[in-house]
Image (cartoon, coloured by chain):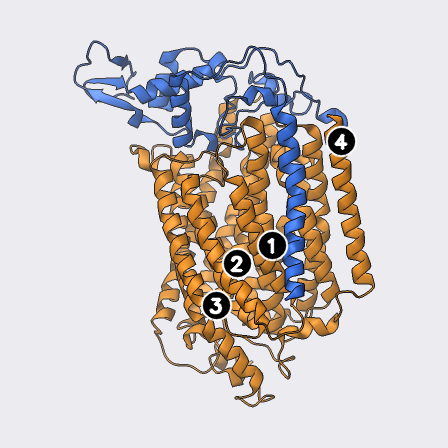
Chain colours: A blue, B orange
């Protein structure tokens, strides 16, 4: 039994070592970093929209982390913004950095597309706004009604994307999602300059 | 970088170096003992030189060297039958989740180029179906099949009966309940939101309990073992069963890691699921099956131990290469890149052993289903690991990050490496447990060719498409929508590859069920790719 135990303890020890370098040290460093003074916490509505962003898995196609232009020149040149710093994500739990760019980076989508109408129409049917887009439609965030009530948020859908008759009305969920997307605006300056990646190699 | 962190980093680096030196010293001075002798641990006296391939009648494979009722054979039979219940429950569940997971994968893949496909329901929206695919195949198929294979091999390796089979069966029930609840939660939009960690943490507790229940028979059986030396496969299995619960628990701690530090924990975990959970299971299985089928011990036993400890040391720190260029400290990324490149050491030692043992015996690939699946899996381990080391380099990663290239690489690892080895292991194990040969050898052939052609199409198309996508993304003059249009044919090809793989899994599942029902004729020869008659005429 001795040697079996030695293997298991050795394996556990090595993992503890890795946890020290890859979990504990970064945690200490990043949670003590300065929070950008212009960064605001999410409102209740925005947080609700963020939960929907998670529930519907937007993260599987959209990143929220522009890279340094000296490392990856495309990111800034496409208008995705300055490189992000740890402080930008202070209020993000869980993080939504993303690993795919099947769609564009959304770190600054709120600054690029400030219009509610654009976002609502785009969510209802992305192809009504962007020809050949492969983003799924989120029609389940909208209701089709014969005639909208006074306090309903009506979305005008151009032909041929709308229903045959009646009107399309945004649900509270759709409005929360748009509020979150518009909150994704990190155009303020970052107090801690990002480390230039490419310069180091 | 603060001075404290710099100091701690230097300390851990020194500890790593000391650990590596201690390892080299202990191998050089033969602290591990045995060497060549240890490599023969898996062969009972007289069995070396005689391959064991699924043949119901055990005396056949041993070719008369041992009397059918010899102690060694009886011990093996006792070991095999003692693990029957738990192995069957884990493997049956695994095959079920493989089929379920494949369909979720196929739906996700189709949606990538046909966005209106099944788009009206929130239950089937891409962002929910895709994580259901990942979780079903990772925690359902790969993990459950892996645990099943480990439960079968450990009594054999310890040359004793499995003790505490009931714990493992109970564990599988709890694990399955966790999977069902977890997938429903994702489908309802209750995901925890981080890749590889989507199951709500409340449900994760079930996996920790289910996994811990599997550790009970492992420890009891190890305490009861009848062998002097622990064969390298048991090292990998024991370590994996220590690592996984630990990792899973830390990474799922709720409300602990905010913002960017959450991302580092996320990817530390996600790559360790590959490196410290499924990889040890995959290469551990190959370390047993390749020599066992060929009837010849692995060529360098000491190298295999070096491979084990260097894997533990390096693989545990590679995770942050998923965040190259991201909003995290540069030293952290560099650390992971260095370890990713160092991973070529364990990979090469494993490659020398697996392929070196095969050397001169490639002819057996024509007959033996298990060997063909397992060896191709082992080969793909070498390929995908070396590709992974390259992919971690900043100059390559700047192109491949955020593209389909990474997805292709992930499937080369999880599918062409791990799943192939698991397929081979299932073909080896089931005849032993059911006391019955596989009913139809042609179905094994069909399974093999469907999944092989499928993953080939999948990998090649996404690798090319992903690379072109990555190069184009760096060039801001290329409009984003042009890139989307450019990738479409590759995404369509992926759906074709995925459909072939799914079809192959259906064939496999049907054959598996037929095996459970003992369909077909009773035979006393192993089921090989070519019939015995053909064999004789050549």
The answer as to whether the residues below labels 4 and 2 share one chain is yes
CA gap, disc 2 to disc 1?
9 Å
Give whichever of discs 1 and 4 has the lower sequence position: 4
Q: Provide the secondary structure element on which disc 2 rests.
A: helix
Circles 3 and 1: CB distance less than 8 Å? no
Depth check, mark 4 against mark 2: the one in front is 4
Residue at the disc numbered 4:
B6
User: Mark 2 near mark 1, Cβ–Cβ under 8 Å?
Assistant: yes
Q: Nearer the N terminus, badge 2 or badge 3?
A: 2
Q: Position of residue A35 (x, y in %)?
A: 59, 17
- Counting residues from the start of the chain, the first of labels 3 and 1 encountered is 1
Kindly identify which residue carries mark 2.
B420
**Residue shown at the point (56%, 47%) measured from the top left:** B246
Q: Secondary structure at mark 1?
A: helix
| Label 1 crowd (10 A; few <14 / some 14-19 / many >=20) | many
- Answer yes or no: are tags 3 and 4 on the same subunit: yes
**Are discs 1 and 4 located on one and the same chain?**
yes
Q: Residue shown at 52%/45% (left/top)?
A: B248
Q: Which chain letter matches label 1?
A: B
Q: Chain of mark 3?
A: B
Q: Position of residue B258 (x, y in %)?
A: 54, 28
As helix, strand or loop, the secondary structure at mark 4 comes to helix
Image x and y of residue A141, in percent: 31, 24
Q: Nearer the viewer, residue B103 or A153?
A: A153
Q: Which picture quadrant has residue B8?
A: top right
A137 or B487, which is in the foreground? Answer: A137
Q: Quadrant of the C terminus of chain B?
A: bottom right
**Mark 3, residue position:** B427
Q: Are marks 3 and 1 on the same chain?
A: yes
Disc 1 designates what residue? B380
């Amino acid at each position: 039994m001795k040697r079996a135990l030695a293997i298991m303890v050795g394996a556990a020890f090595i993992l503890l070592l890795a946890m020290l370098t890859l979990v504990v040290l970064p945690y200490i460093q990043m949670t003590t970093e300065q929070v950008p003074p212009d960064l605001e916490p999410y409102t209740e509505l925005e947080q609700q929209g963020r939960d929907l962003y998670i529930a519907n898995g937007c993260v599987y196609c959209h990143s929220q982390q522009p890279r340094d232009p000296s490392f990856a020149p495309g990111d800034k040149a496409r208008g995705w913004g300055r490189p992000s710093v740890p402080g930008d994500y202070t209020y993000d739990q869980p993080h939504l950095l993303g690993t795919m760019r099947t769609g564009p980076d959304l770190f600054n989508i709120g600054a690029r597309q400030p219009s509610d109408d654009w976002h609502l129409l785009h969510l209802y049917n992305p192809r009504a706004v962007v020809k050949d887009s492969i983003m799924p439609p989120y029609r389940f965030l909208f209701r089709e009604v014969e005639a909208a009530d006074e306090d309903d948020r009506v979305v005008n859908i151009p032909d041929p994307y709308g229903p045959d008759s009646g009107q399309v009305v945004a649900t509270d969920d759709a409005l929360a999602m748009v509020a979150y997307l518009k909150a994704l605006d990190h155009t303020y300056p970052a107090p801690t300059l990002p480390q230039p990646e490419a310069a180091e190699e | 970088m603060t001075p404290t962190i710099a100091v701690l980093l230097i300390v851990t680096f020194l500890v790593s170096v000391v650990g590596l030196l201690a390892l080299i010293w202990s191998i050089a001075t033969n602290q591990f003992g045995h060497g060549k002798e240890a490599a023969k641990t898996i062969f009972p006296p007289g069995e070396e030189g005689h391959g064991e391939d699924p043949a119901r009648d055990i005396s056949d494979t041993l070719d008369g060297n041992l009397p059918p009722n010899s102690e060694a054979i009886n011990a093996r039979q006792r070991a095999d039958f003692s693990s029957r219940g738990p192995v069957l429950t884990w493997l049956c569940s695994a095959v079920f989740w493989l089929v379920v997971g494949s369909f979720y994968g196929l739906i996700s893949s189709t949606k990538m180029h046909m966005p209106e496909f099944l788009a009206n329901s929130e239950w089937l929206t891409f962002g929910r179906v895709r994580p259901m695919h990942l979780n079903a195949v990772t925690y359902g198929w790969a993990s459950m099949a892996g645990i099943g294979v480990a439960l079968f091999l450990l009594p054999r390796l310890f040359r004793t009966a499995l003790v505490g089979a009931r714990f493992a069966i109970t564990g599988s029930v709890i694990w399955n309940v966790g999977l069902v609840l977890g997938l429903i939660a994702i489908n309802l939009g209750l995901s925890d939101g981080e890749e590889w960690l989507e199951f709500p943490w409340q449900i994760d507790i079930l996996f920790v309990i289910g996994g811990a229940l599997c550790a009970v028979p492992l420890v009891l059986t190890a305490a009861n073992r009848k062998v002097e030396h622990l064969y390298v496969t048991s090292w990998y299995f024991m370590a994996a069963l220590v690592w996984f619960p630990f990792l899973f628990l830390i990474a799922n701690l709720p409300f602990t890691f905010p913002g960017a530090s959450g991302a580092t924990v996320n990817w530390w975990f996600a790559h360790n699921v590959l490196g410290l959970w499924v990889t040890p299971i995959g290469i551990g299985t190959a370390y047993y099956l390749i020599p066992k089928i060929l009837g010849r011990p692995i060529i360098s036993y000491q190298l295999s131990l070096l491979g084990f400890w260097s894997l533990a040391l390096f693989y545990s720190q590679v995770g942050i290469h998923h965040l190259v260029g991201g909003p995290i400290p540069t030293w952290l990324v560099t650390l992971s890149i260095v370890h990713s490149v160092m991973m070529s050491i364990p990979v090469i030692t494993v490659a020398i052993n697996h392929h070196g043992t095969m050397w001169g015996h490639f002819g057996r690939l024509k007959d033996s289903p298990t060997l063909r699946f397992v060896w191709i899996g082992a080969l793909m381990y070498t390929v995908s690991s070396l590709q992974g080391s390259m992919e971690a380099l900043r100059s390559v990663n700047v192109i491949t990050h955020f593209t389909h290239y990474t997805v292709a690489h992930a499937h080369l690892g999880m599918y062409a490496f791990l799943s192939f080895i698991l397929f081979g292991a299932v073909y080896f194990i089931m005849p032993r447990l059911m006391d019955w040969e596989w009913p139809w050898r042609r179905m094994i052939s069909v399974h093999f060719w469907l999944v092989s052609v499928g993953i080939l199409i999948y990998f090649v198309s996404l690798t090319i498409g992903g690379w072109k996508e990555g190069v184009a993304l760096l060039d801001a003059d290329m409009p984003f929508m042009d890139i989307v249009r450019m990738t479409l044919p590759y995404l369509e090809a992926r759906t074709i590859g995925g459909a072939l793989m799914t079809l192959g899994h259906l064939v496999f599942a049907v054959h598996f069920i037929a095996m459970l029902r003992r369909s077909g004729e009773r035979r006393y020869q192993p089921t090989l790719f070519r019939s015995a008659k053909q064999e004789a005429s050549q």
